[in-house]
Amino acid sequence: MGQLPAFDHVGITVADLPAATAFFVGLGLEVEGRAVLEGDFLDTVCGIRDARTEIVMLRAPGGGTGLELSSFVRPEPDPGSPTAMANELGLRSVALEINDLQAVISRLATDGYSLVGGVGRYENAWLMAYVRGPEGIIVALAERIE
């Protein structure tokens, strides 16, 4: 076995943990666990003294790579760019395979979330769209087509 036995999760820091959690649960992810972290472990790993964070770990029903949502209680979070586009350096999107892209886009629109661009078709294999979710997170939604 190589140096990388698994790709476990991607972490995103948010200000409103309940809203971000509800958004991703609404897309079909399931809450795997919740925790509050503080103390030497967190201070050492994140390099911030006296830090305290609340986290929610989410995964697809079939398992696979998780999504960790984290909200810092201490210190106050630094705001990111809620309107960042795909060409801005840094983590720009989280991709999820879904069924019925148009229905999901319509439902998210009623919740106030809009497309970044439009719906694209890739080689008669995928329909895909970027949706700007809570706190500006871009979520790539992809539907496999035949």
Image: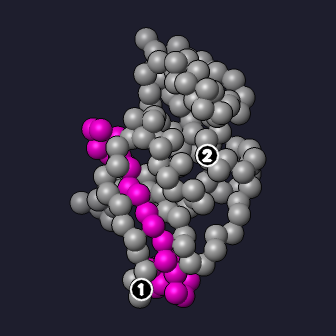
Q: Residue at x 61, y 41 (%)?
A: 133
Residue 90 visible within the image: yes
Neighbours of disc 2 within 10 Å: few (<14), some (14-19), many (20+): many
| Start-end of magenta stretch | 42-65
97 and 18: which is toward the camera: 18
Q: Residue at x 29, y 44 (%)?
A: 63
Q: Residue at x 54, y 48 (%)?
A: 19
User: What secondary structure is found at the residue carrying circle 2?
Assistant: helix
Residue 122 visible within the image: no
In reply to whether residue 51 is colored magenta, the answer given is yes
Q: Is residue 131 above or below residue 84?
A: above
Q: Residue at x 51, y 41 (%)?
A: 23
Neighbours of disc 1 within 10 Å: few (<14), some (14-19), many (20+): few
Cα separation, mark 1 vs mark 2, equals 29 Å
Q: How many marks?
A: 2
User: What secondary structure is found at the residue carrying circle 1?
Assistant: loop
Q: Which residue is mark 1?
A: 39
Q: Which residue is mark 2?
A: 134
As drawn, the label of residue 55 is none
Answer with the quarter of the image where residue 57 lies: bottom left
Please state which amino acid type lies under the numbered disc 1. Answer: Gly
Q: Is residue 96 above or below residue 45?
A: above
Identify the image quadrant of the N terminus: bottom left
Nearer-N-terminus badge (1/2): 1
Query: Residue 101 location in percent, x, y?
Result: 52, 21
9 horizontally vs 80: left or right: left
Please state which amino acid type lies under the numbered disc 2. Answer: Pro
Identify the image quadrant of the C terminus: top left
In reply to whether residue 19 is colored magenta, the answer given is no
